[in-house]
């Protein structure tokens, strides 16, 4: 029943992601590109569209290979270290898998571009919640590997906590070292909770 319901919910979530893209890239793009650090400088692209697409496809293929190596290495590490697959899947893999986005967000924060740093971090979360997870459900249906969007009480509570903490941090569009420390503390608390879950 849950799997079947997930098959109907997944396309709705993907539609939500498409709506978010339309909102952020077209209808309200000025809200997302507002630069408070002076006028925007337009730079001519160094690559042609064809070259950029080819490099993007090659990079996606390389990421697929690296992900496969990571998963096989992780399976062995889970056995050796005695970690639960739940902890590895919710804490370690996201840190490793989002290393590029996390480092970009950190660099932007160090340059005092908190608007961009938060956009990177929140955009990544939106992409996973509204595109990647539902897409995996639909691919599971296509490959006859049932997947659903059912979450445990602990997972729902952690998502609610993450949304609450994030909204309180971005509410005033400013941040400081204490808010950053509290974000890391909240993530660490969730990590400990899922380690023992």
Image (cartoon, rainbow, N blue to C red):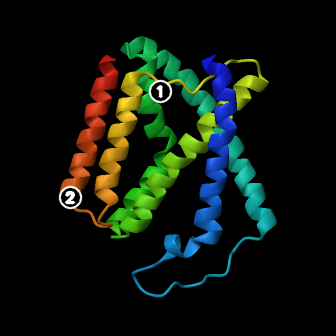
User: In the picture, which quadrant includes the N terminus?
Assistant: top right
Residue 168, located in which quarter of the rendered image? bottom left
Residue at the image point whose x is 67% and y is 18% from the top = 146
User: 74 or 114, which is in the foreground?
Assistant: 114
Please provide percent x and percent y for residue 139: 73, 29
Please tell me which residue lies in front, 85 or 7: 7
Where residue 191 sits, quadrant-wise, is top left
Dot label at residue 15: none
Q: Position of residue 183 (x, y in %)?
A: 27, 47
Give percent across and percent down for residue 39.
48, 87
Going by the image, does 127 lie left or right of 113? right
- Between 90 and 26, the residue placed more toward the observer is 26
Cα separation between marks 2 and 1: 28 Å
Which quarter shows the C terminus?
top left
On residue 177, the disc is 2
Q: Is residue 65 visible?
A: no
Residue at the far left in the pictured view: 178
- Residue at the spot x=73%, y=62% of the render? 52
The disc, 2 or 1, on the residue closer to the chain's N-terminal end is 1
Residue occupied by mark 1: 89
Residue 181 locus on image (x, y percent): 22, 49
């Amino acid at each position: 029943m849950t799997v079947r319901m997930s098959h109907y919910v997944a396309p709705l979530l993907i539609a939500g992601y498409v709506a978010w893209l339309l909102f952020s890239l077209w209808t309200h793009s000025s809200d997302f590109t507002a630069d408070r650090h002076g006028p925007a400088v337009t730079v001519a692209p160094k690559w042609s569209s064809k070259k950029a697409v080819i490099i993007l496809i090659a990079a996606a293929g390389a990421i697929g290979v690296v992900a496969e190596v990571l998963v096989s290495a992780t399976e062995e590490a889970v056995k050796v270290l005695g970690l639960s697959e739940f902890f590895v899947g919710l804490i370690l893999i996201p840190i490793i898998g989002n290393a590029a986005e996390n480092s970009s967000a950190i660099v932007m924060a160090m340059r005092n571009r908190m608007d961009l740093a938060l956009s990177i971090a929140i955009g990544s979360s939106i992409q996973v919640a509204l595109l990647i997870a539902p897409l995996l459900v639909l691919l599971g249906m296509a490959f006859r590997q049932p997947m659903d969007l059912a979450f445990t009480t602990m997972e729902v509570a952690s998502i609610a906590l993450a949304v609450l903490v994030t909204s309180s941090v971005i509410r005033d569009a400013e941040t400081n070292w204490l808010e950053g420390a509290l974000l890391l503390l909240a993530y660490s608390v969730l990590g400990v909770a899922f380690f023992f879950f």
